Amino acid sequence: MAHKFVDNYRERGARKKLAEKLKDRGIQDKNVLGAIAKVPRHYFFDETFWLQAYKDIAFPIGDGQTISQPYTVAYQTELLHIKKGDKVLEVGTGSGYQTCILIELGADVYTIERQENLYNRTKLVLPHMGYQAHFFCGDGSKGILDHAPYDKILVTAGAPFVPEILLKQLKIGGILVIPVGDEQTQKMLTVIRVSETEYEKFELDTFRFVPLVGDQAW
């Protein structure tokens, strides 16, 4: 983690170039690209690795976790169709970078992380950056039932199946985005809750995430 916050012309220019690169890769939502261009990703890196911050790559952040590749963050976020004021459950806070992107889009974010070190770090760092979210430490595969239902749910780790308990925490018309597969590769799924008992599921591109660990996962 960076020891001081530096956000100068060079970093702002690097973010703009990153957003342009993601647009070239197929990200179309202008609001998502705008959020990518605003969030200072280098702040989630030790100063030694700042040159890596605006490359379209994942990067280790400790505790066996990574800060997701910007393309993956943009891809998942675009699928959520965030509207200002949406109540969003994020399963897997990680570095907090994805959390910041959601907040930039106007979401009210409830984010849960099972790794206590990451939880303690993000709940301090994000407010320092000006990003306010509701932070929880625990088993994200079970969601956060006390604050359900949610307009949108985003899972940022690979699951072996879609946890039924997460589906039940969606509002009618709500969207769940989750990568599902084995521990090596996953297909991105979008699930829309049509009614109390009906869901529509769409299978999309292949990705590779760290495993979702919990009672309703690996």
Image (tube, grey):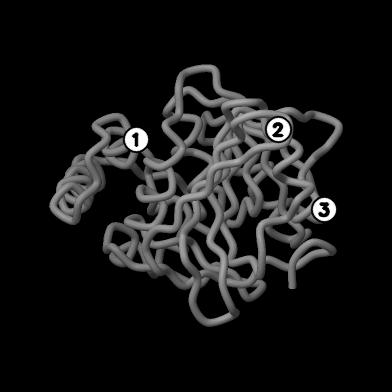
The residue to which callout 3 is attached is 138
Residue 156 % position (x, y)? 56, 56
Residue 132 visible? no
- Residue depicted at 66% across the width and 57% down the height: 162
Q: Which mark is residue 35?
A: 1
- What's the amino acid at mark 1? Ala
- Give the amino acid at mark 3: Gly
Element at label 1: helix
Single out the residue that lies furthest toward the top.
Answer: 85
* Res 45 → quadrant: bottom left
Tell me which corner region of the image, top left, top right, bottom left or bottom right, holds residue 196: top right
For numbered disc 3, what is the local secondary structure?
A: loop
Judging depth in this view, the residue of 3 and 28 nearest the camera is 28
Residue identifier under label 2: 134
Q: Spatial distance from mark 1 to mark 3, Cα to Cα?
A: 28 Å
Looking at the picture, does residue 123 appear above or below residue 84?
below
Q: Is residue 46 above or below residue 120?
A: below
Q: CA distance from mark 3 to mark 2?
A: 13 Å
Residue 60 image offset from top left, x and y in percent: 50, 72
> x, y percentage for residue 168?
76, 39
Q: Residues within 10 Å of mark 2 (few under 14, many from 20)?
A: few
